[in-house]
Amino acid sequence: MNMTTMTKGLSKFVLRTSVALPLVLAPAVSVTVLEAVGIEAGFAQARAAEEKTRKVPSMRQNVSKKLGKAQEAADAENWNEALAALRDMEADKSDYNGYETAMMYYFYGFVYYSMERYKQAVDAYRNVLRQGSENLPRSLEVNTMRTVAQLYFVTENYDQALVYYEKWFAVADDITADSYAERAQVYYQKGDQAKALSDVNTAVSMYEKEGKVPKENWFGLQRYLYYEKNDYKSVTGILEKLVKHYPKAEYYKQLAGMYGELKREKDQLHMMEAAYIAGALQKEKELLNMAYLFMGHEMPYKAAKVIDTGIKEKKIERTSKNLETLAQAYQMAQELRKSIPNLEAAAKLSDKGELYSRLAGIYLDLDKNEQAISMGSRALKKGGLKRPDQLYLVLGMANASLKKYDDALSSLKKARKDDRSKKFADQWINYVEREKEREEQLAI
């Protein structure tokens, strides 16, 4: 796997996993609104405990009833009716205290969010905060800051998202790993990779210290940011975790690629083989790379099986080049019976005679001289040979073995015209001439 492919894969992953944050609006709003109309006793007790440190106004019954109408419509997911109830309520806004006004806007925000009208939801939640700390329970104020930050992120206003995340981090008591992961994505979108990496590392570390498996998209962002720093060792460590906890084809392949970058060839081979066994390698290039790795590690038979299976399953195209590679793998594995038919098939598909020339040499080594001459003739007919002198040597030796001395001498004399083959050709010419003379004398 080359580095360009790796970069594209990582970029796509980050874009896919970092564009959305988990909004936690619905649970917070439901509890708050239920408390406002006197239903959620547990929340009311928590609020009472909180008021020991921050005194806020109470919600009067007539306001609770108005908010309750909006609540009923929202429970039925009749959002337009809920908005209508809130607008009727807003007409009397001048009569409300700060807490009552805040709760009205808080519910506005919930309804707009549910309708996916995020910009209006942001405005509503910011109106909650405008009522001032003296009118808001601390938990409501802190949670609203986070909600505004999340909504700004969703609407791609990353500058404002960061402003509110910073405010929230400054006052919240329950900053968790998820909190750091959220802010990391904001930093990433703003292009501050150093702070993004710091935050996502904190998130991952917090989870791991608790014995929990960090979320997949945290690893994804962490991995990408280290890759941008050319820290391949760290990228490899993260991919090893992804393969362990979130085994996917892409992770197997990327980890194999990183092992290659780190010159860990055996680990690269094992990881690619694991990916192959898991069915993660489906494209022709991936399967051929697998085969080349096997051949490079002196496992030619495994390489041949990968290519042979790929051709049969039509994942690898039956081209001259691919058949030649298959034949080469079988030849390296000393499986000439399987190598020769594939090399002949490759030769037929090739527009040059080079493969036929190779076949001629193989048949000569097997002492199949008639086949050697036949392949040699086809090679010369197709042409395009890199070393015709070598083929003429083969033809000379094959004809000599068949006692076709004139044909042998004709081929050998053509071979000697190339200085690279002259010495060897002359030796064979002398031999053939002696044998021819001896045969002629015996025939007298």
Image (cartoon, grey):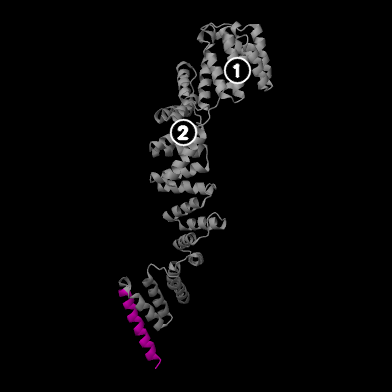
- Residue 153 or 183: which is nearer the viewer? 153
Q: Which residue is mark 2?
A: 221
**Residue at coordinates 63% horizontally, 15% vertically from top-left?**
87
Q: Which residue is mark 1?
A: 108
The picture quadrant where one finds residue 228 is top left
- 212 above or below 380? above
Q: Residues within 10 Å of mark 1 (few under 14, many from 20)?
A: many
Mark 2 → mark 1, Cα distance in angstroms: 34 Å
Q: What's the magenta region? A: 422-444
- Pinpoint residue 434: horizontal percent, then vertical percent: 34, 84
Q: Quadrant of residue 421?
A: bottom left
- For the C terminus, the image quarter is bottom left
Q: Is residue 431 found inside the magenta-colored segment of the image?
A: yes
Q: Nearer the viewer, residue 274 or 380?
A: 380
Whichever of labels 2 and 1 marks the residue nearer the N terminus, that label is 1
Residue 62 to residue 224: above or below = above
Residue most extreme to the front:
91
SS state under label 1:
helix
User: Magenta segment, principal secondary structure?
Assistant: helix
Residue 170: give x, y in percent of width and height.
45, 17
Residue 27 on the magenta span: no
